[in-house]
Image (cartoon, helix red, strand yellow):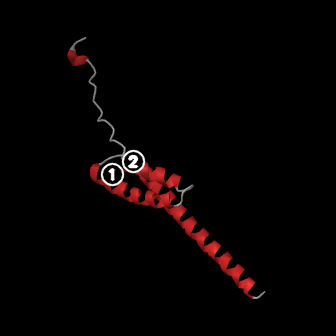
């Protein structure tokens, strides 16, 4: 076997590193299920991570997107819960005013 007949191996480029901010966005959004203000941090970190990923050509865009979706969903549910609770309180005091 000569060198000319040896199969050539092409080196694949190393995978792009995962953006740490994207992982933090997802972690904060998951933490937002127990501590609602953490979801806001997940949204902020998610937007920052997506900008960094586009600029530095890193991986982790799916983590950042999942953090954004979960964060926005939790913020929406928290606001809906506050409005619903406020409606119940207003109705309770409205009923009590007539007694």
Q: Position of residue 14 (x, y in %)?
A: 31, 35
- Inspect this view and state whether residue 94 appears: yes
Q: Is residue 55 placed above or below 3 in the rendered structure?
A: below
Query: Which residue lies under the disc numbered 2?
Result: 60
The reply to whether dot 1 and dot 2 touch (C-beta < 8 Å) is: yes
Quarter the N terminus occupies: top left
Taking depth in this image into account, of 71 and 65 the one nearest to the observer is 71
Taking depth in this image into account, of 58 and 79 the one nearest to the observer is 79
The mark nearer the N terminus, 1 or 2, is 1
Measured in 3D between alpha carbons, the distance from the residue under mark 1 to the one under mark 2, in whole angstroms, is: 7 Å
Left or right, 97 with respect to 54, comes to right
Q: Position of residue 24 (x, y in %)?
A: 42, 50
Q: Is residue 15 placed above or below 47 in the rendered structure?
A: above
Residue drawn 54% across and 57% down? 35
Residue 77, located in which quarter of the rendered image?
bottom right
Q: Position of residue 89 (x, y in %)?
A: 67, 77
Q: Position of residue 17 (x, y in %)?
A: 34, 41
Residue 53 got which mark?
1
Left or right, 77 with respect to 23, comes to right
């Amino acid at each position: 076997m000569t060198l000319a007949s040896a199969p050539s191996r092409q080196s694949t480029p190393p995978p792009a590193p995962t953006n740490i901010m994207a992982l933090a966005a997802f972690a904060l959004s998951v933490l937002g299920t127990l501590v609602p203000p953490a979801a806001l941090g997940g949204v902020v970190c998610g937007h920052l991570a997506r900008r960094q990923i586009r600029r530095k050509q890193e991986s982790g865009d799916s983590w950042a997107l999942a953090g954004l979706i979960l964060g926005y969903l939790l913020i929406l549910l928290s606001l809906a819960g506050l409005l619903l609770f406020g409606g119940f309180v207003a109705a309770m005091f409205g009923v009590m005013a007539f007694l």
